[in-house]
Image (cartoon, rainbow, N blue to C red):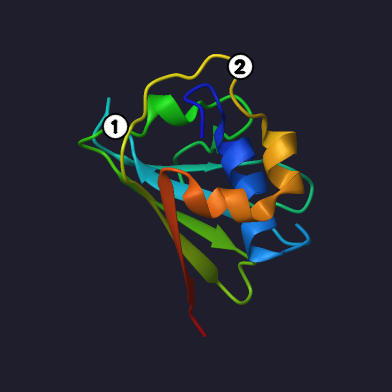
């Protein structure tokens, strides 16, 4: 995924790859490379009841490149807090920029292309 994509864009990509319909709440957990603390990244909404002292980092404003580095490669995506479906997101490599690269909407039309990106998705269902 391009470096200017946000965690919201990554959320949409995961939804497409997993054939989920975005009916449930979700969030990412990832180490903040600037603070060394675990951040929770997601969307605040009427249905989201956030517990804890830390503020939720807004996914639509937070670029993947602000968190993912060659030293900071792993994030955890949790979807459907009731069933606690989790996807491990791992940065495999950083590719050079390609002028006129493919857009997220084009990738959505061809979901199989997501499997060829530099992000490895591993679904883990926890009951």
Mark 1 highlights which residue?
69
Image coords of residue 107 (percent x, y): 67, 42
Q: Quadrant of residue 69?
A: top left
User: Badge 1: few (under 14), some or many (20 or more) residues near its Cα, within 10 Å?
Assistant: some
User: Badge 2: few (under 14), some or many (20 or more) residues near its Cα, within 10 Å?
Assistant: few
Q: How many marks?
A: 2
Image coords of residue 51 (percent x, y): 54, 53
Q: Which mark is residue 10?
A: none
Which mark is nearer the camera, 2 or 1? Answer: 2
Horizontal arrangement in the rendering, residue 67 relative to residue 109 (left or right): left
Which of 71 and 107 lies nearest the eye of the viewer?
107
* As drawn, 104 above or below 89: above
| Mark with earlier residue (2, 1) | 1
Mark 2 highlights which residue?
100
Horizontal arrangement in the rendering, residue 25 relative to residue 75 (left or right): right
Q: Of all residues shown, which one is farthest toward the top?
A: 99
Instruction: Give the residue displayed 61% in from the left and 16% down from the top.
Output: 100
Q: Does dot 1 land on a helix, a strand or a loop?
A: loop
Q: Does dot 2 land on a helix, a strand or a loop?
A: loop
């Amino acid at each position: 995924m391009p470096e200017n994509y946000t965690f919201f864009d990554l959320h949409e990509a995961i939804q497409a790859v997993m054939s989920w319909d975005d009916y449930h709440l979700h969030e990412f957990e990832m180490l903040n490379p600037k603070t060394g603390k675990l951040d929770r990244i997601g969307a605040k909404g009427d249905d989201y009841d956030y517990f804890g002292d830390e503020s939720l980092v807004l996914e639509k404003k937070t670029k993947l490149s602000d968190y993912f580095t060659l030293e900071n490669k792993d994030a955890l995506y949790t979807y459907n807090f009731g069933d606690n479906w989790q996807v491990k997101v791992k940065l495999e490599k950083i590719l050079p920029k390609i002028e006129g690269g493919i857009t997220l909407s084009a990738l959505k039309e061809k979901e199989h292309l997501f499997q060829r990106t530099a992000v490895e998705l591993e679904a883990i269902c926890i009951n």
